[in-house]
Image: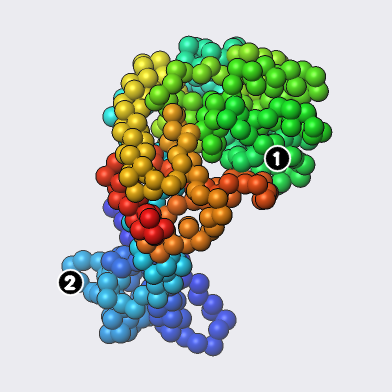
Amino acid sequence: MGTSAPEIFLDIDRGRPRGLRAQIEERLREAIRSGRLAAGTAVPSTRALAADLDVTRKVVVEAYDQLVAEGYLVARPGAATVVNPAAPRPAPADPPPDGGRDVEVDFRPGRPDLALFPRAAWARASRAALRATPTGDFAYDDPRGLPRLRRSLSDYLARVRGVSADPARVIVCAGFAHAFDLILDVLPARFAVEAPGYPSPRRQLTDHGVPFDGVPVDDEGIDVAALRRTAARAVHVTPAHQSPTGAVLSPRRRHELVGWARDVDGYIVEDDYDAEYRYDRRPVGALQGVAPDRVIYCGTTSKTLASGLRLGWLVVPPPLVEPIVARRHLTDGATSTILQATFAEFLDSGDLDRHLRHTRRVYRERRDAVIASLRQWLPRATPSGVSAGQNVLVTLPAGTDERAVVARALAAGVRVYPLADFRPAPNAGDRPGLILGYGSVPAGRAVHGIRLLSHALGS
């Protein structure tokens, strides 16, 4: 007959002068005080622990009895001995310096509402994928990813984003950061980034030791004339909905940017950030469709489904396919086959289209609540970048101290984020601003948060 006795690790030193019983007591006390053994955790039976430690049962019985007497353990007749919920526990960590008040509303940018994740549809896709996926597909095979998913992505991206995506040039990966790491491993070139722009690419460039230049962004997107004044031969851009300003790369700038790439024999890394969520404008096709030989296209499920899925994709110009695939083979090898098969089923069934139609309505309602509240409570602030995405840029009056605003807001119970965090370097002409993410903030909470912010600013 088998046993279900739990196991715990106790480091017993038989060379120590203190007796074995005292050591067992000491180790168990430490485990309970430190929180390694949580309240209510069952400890092994005296017989099982004696066998594990190669000691007599009497030694363990006496150790348990002592810990019961001290209140560390609770012995229940006919049941397992457990850690006493009232036993001494580790002192709680010092609270974060949030002004002594809990955060009521967090306008963190780039965070979708995870409660909207389509659990039922995803579970249905997972079951269908497990039934349909051939056994051989569960092995490590093509580092580019599961052939079925690459075909599904090729069809989807061509239909929805205007991407020229031969499945042979599609590489499945674990989100944008992973994709950008692969690109930096095989593209030895000086980079340019948008200024202001999403901070993650700058951190990765720094980690890789790749020099880069910040290039200004205006209402038409990245300033290509300024880009030409740099020595960069590669550039990271968010053309569909620039992060964080919300600018859309204009048709004129698109052609200028592609012309720059051809002139310097360089590449454009297109981060198709927030392309799926648009409210007051027509869809804008991917830049990759204009110049598939010069654009490395990157997409993910991080904003549409959940960042925790760790699923993304690259569409790569022909000369870079083999180097990136070789690098992928040497690093993590491949993305989970089951995850890929599930997402392929999710795409092919139309579930992603249905999910996006639903979440666009939700996020538009939240966007509208934020804009209306800003007009009511902060009339001197100027919102922009609101036609798409899940964030709004709030430009503050000249001379406003962003950091002071953030601190006062936090003390009032609302967390907001300074535009300075998105700038590669400060500039004397920069206008102060805040980035408010509304993706994970229901409309009612957003209204409350803007009201708190206005009180903090004395508006």
x and y percentages locating residue 41 in the rendered image: 31, 65
x and y percentages locating residue 402 in the rendered image: 53, 55
Q: Residue furthest left?
A: 77
The colour scheme of the drawn protein is: rainbow
x and y percentages locating residue 170 in the rendered image: 59, 19
Give the camera-side residue of 142 and 10: 142
Can I make out residue 309 in this image?
no
Give the camera-side residue of 328 and 54: 328
Q: Residue at x 54, y 30 (%)?
A: 247
The answer to which image quadrant residue 200 occupies is: top right
Numbered disc in front, either 2 or 1: 1
Question: Residue 214 shows which numbered tag?
Answer: 1
Can I make out residue 215 in this image?
yes
Q: Residue at x 62, y 46 (%)?
A: 430
Disc 2 on helix, strand or loop?
loop
Give yes or no for contact between labels 2 and 1 (Cβ–Cβ under 8 Å). no
The answer to which image quadrant residue 57 occupies is: bottom left
The answer to which image quadrant residue 319 occupies is: top right
Which residue is labeled 2 in the image?
Answer: 77
Say few, some or many: other residues with alpha carbon within 10 Å of mark 2 (under 14 / 14 to 19 / 20 or more). few
Q: Residue at x 54, y 36 (%)?
A: 245
x and y percentages locating residue 340 in the rendered image: 48, 26
Query: Is residue 3 placed above or below 329 in the rendered structure?
Result: below
Q: Would you say 210 lies left or right of 390 here?
A: right
* Type of amino acid at the residue the image marks with label 2: Pro
* Type of amino acid at the residue the image marks with label 1: Gly
Give the camera-side residue of 289 and 5: 289
Query: Is residue 169 placed above or below 221 in the rendered structure?
Result: above
Q: Would you say 451 lies left or right of 211 here?
A: left
Give the camera-side residue of 278 and 155: 278
